[in-house]
Each structure stands twice: as structure tokens, then as C-alpha cells.
Image (cartoon, grey):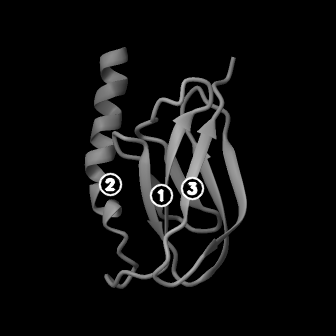
């Protein structure tokens, strides 16, 4: 079972590897936000965490080092949603995403007991 979960996340990450380039919907780099997701207790990077802009269909995933880069269609305030199996869902409200500026976020997810 553990092997199947690892393979699943590897496939997700490989499938989403083009998202790490911070390209916008039209192929030009612009409004992007980046960061890292870690376990709240251990500080260990979490690979395969789902990251979404609230209200949009596009979904991103953290890489093997827990890092993510997402792009937004325009500058503004966005709510970011983070979800991962066995961890509490996290929502960051009113994250400012500006033209050509990266927001380096540190997201700490708490394991569900």
C-alpha cells in the first residue's frame, strides 16, 4: 500500500512538472507566488501537496523538496488552498500576487490525529 501511494505521488509530480516554471496561462511569465510546504512538527518537506487558487480549476503540486510555484491570471489578492492526505487542510486568505514578484511563503501543515 505504501508503495502504491509513493508511485501515485510520483506520477502526480511528474505530470505537473511543467507547473514549476511559473509560466502564465498565455505562456509568458508574470504573476506568480512560490513557497514551501512542511510538516508543522518535524519541519520535513511535504511532496505532492495540492495547491490551488480559490475559484480557479488549475491545481499545482509541491515537488520533492516541498516547493511550489503557482501563477495567477492577474495581479491581486487571492486565497490559496493547501491539502494533503492525513493533514489538516490549510487556507491562506488575501495573499497578494503582483507582476513579476514572487511571494516566498512557508506553509506548515498539521497532521490529523
Q: Nearer the viewer, residue 1 or 110?
A: 110
Residue at image x 35%, y 62%?
19
28 displayed left or right of 56 = left
> Is residue 7 shown above or below 17?
above
Q: Percent position (x, y) of residue 91?
A: 70, 51
Q: Tag 3 or tag 2, which sits nearer the N-term?
A: 2
The disc at residue 105 is 3
Q: Is residue 99 left or right of residue 95?
A: left
In this rendering, the label closer to the viewer, 2 or 3: 3
Relative to 64, say whether 31 is above or below. Answer: below
Q: Earlier in the sequence, mark 2 or mark 1?
A: 2
- For the N terminus, the image quarter is top left
| Residue bearing mark 2 | 16
Tell me what residue is drawn at x 49 percent, y 77 percent.
Answer: 101
The quarter of the picture where the C terminus appears is: top right
* Label 3 Cα neighbours within 10 Å, binned few <14 / some 14-19 / many ≥20: some
Amino acid at each position: 500500500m505504501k508503495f502504491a501511494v509513493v508511485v501515485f505521488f510520483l506520477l502526480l509530480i511528474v505530470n505537473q512538472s511543467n507547473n514549476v516554471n511559473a509560466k502564465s496561462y498565455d505562456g509568458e511569465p508574470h504573476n506568480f507566488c512560490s513557497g514551501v510546504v512542511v510538516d508543522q512538527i518535524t519541519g520535513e518537506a511535504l511532496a505532492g501537496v495540492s495547491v490551488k487558487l480559490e475559484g480557479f480549476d488549475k491545481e499545482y503540486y509541491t515537488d520533492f523538496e516541498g516547493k511550489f510555484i503557482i501563477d495567477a491570471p492577474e495581479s491581486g489578492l487571492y486565497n490559496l488552498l493547501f491539502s494533503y492526505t492525513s493533514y489538516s487542510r490549510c487556507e491562506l486568505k488575501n495573499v497578494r500576487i503582483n507582476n513579476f514578484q514572487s511571494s516566498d511563503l512557508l506553509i506548515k501543515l498539521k497532521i490529523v490525529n
